[in-house]
Image (cartoon, rainbow, N blue to C red):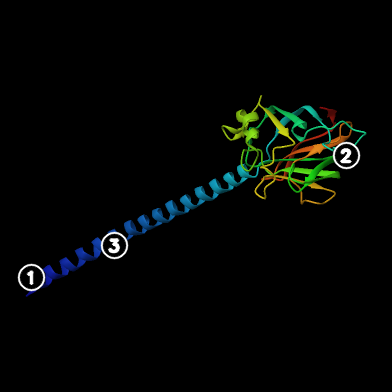
Amino acid sequence: MKTWGKIRAKEFVSSESESDAVTPIIGSLLMLIVLVALAGVAVISFSNIANEGESTQPLVARISLESCEGGLYDVDSKDEKITRLVENRIVLVHEGGNSLPCNTIAIKISGYGNSYKGIVAKGGTSIKGNTEVLYQNIDSKEKNGTYMDRNGAVINDGSWNVGEKLVLCGQDSANGTAKSSVKVSVDGDSNTSDNYGFKAGSEVTLKVIDFKSNNVIAEYQAVVKQA
């Protein structure tokens, strides 16, 4: 009986010692797992902050106005040369800085000009006054087919890059449909064909805008040269 008692006591002591040794190891492992998880959360958070900073960073580019010419298409006017809408052209050149994504760049032109109520050559009526033209983007979406022909270098890779020219025309609208991404209003009236012309000899204001960051990249005042 004494021998059994000694053996049992010895086994009990041995079991307790193993438990005491395992407990610190489990605790260390749990702490390591928690630290790794916290480190992962911190890395993700800093990464998100960095990405947000990049996405809101304003684009910077040097855009020059190479030419601005046109005139009004008004068959009733005896004082002005009749100029076709397609002859109203503005040429812009990207000379340096960031590449500009075609789908986030808008262009706004304002000055004394004209458009049509209704469809050109289908009973439309010419209206003249303070004219606002907005290119909602500079890609080929919802524009006249010839826009792509003139601006293929800009559109093909989806960005306006250094050295490339962008040519705007008074007939870039997608046939005056509601889906056109070129919007025109005259004296606040937006019920127009979305084609446009600006009076020769008058001054227009042009802005290149990154609407993603609401940043004006370039702004010009120019006198329209007779086409």
Type of amino acid at the residue the image marks with label 2: Asp
Q: Which of 225 and 126 is in front in this view?
A: 126
**Total marks placed:** 3
**In which quadrant will I find the C terminus?**
top right
Q: Which residue is painted at 61% across and 44% down in the image?
A: 55
Q: Distance between the residues labelled 3 and 2?
A: 103 Å
Q: Is residue 222 above or below residue 7?
A: above
Name the residue that disc number 3 marks: 20
> Which marked residue is nearer to the observer: mark 1 or mark 3?
3
In the rendered image, which residue does mark 1 sit on? Answer: 3
Q: What residue type is labelled 3?
A: Asp
Horizontal and vertical percent position of residue 62? 73, 29
The 10 Å Cα crowd at callout 2, few under 14, some 14 to 19, many 20 or more, is few
Return the x and y of residue 42 as percentages of the image width and height: 51, 50
Instruction: Identify the residue at image location x=47%, y=54%.
Output: 38
Can you give x and y, in whole percent of width and height, for residue 208 in the image?
74, 38
In the image: residue 18, left or right of residue 154? left
Of labels 3 and 2, earlier in sequence is: 3
Is tag 2's residue or tag 1's residue first in the polypeptide sequence?
Answer: 1
Mark 1 neighbour class, 10 Å CA radius: few under 14, some 14 to 19, many 20 or more? few
The amino acid type, in three-letter code, at marker 1 is: Thr
Reading the image, the residue beneath label 2 is 76
On screen, residue 189 versus residue 31, left or right, reads right
The residue lying toward the viewer, choosing from 5 and 212, is 212
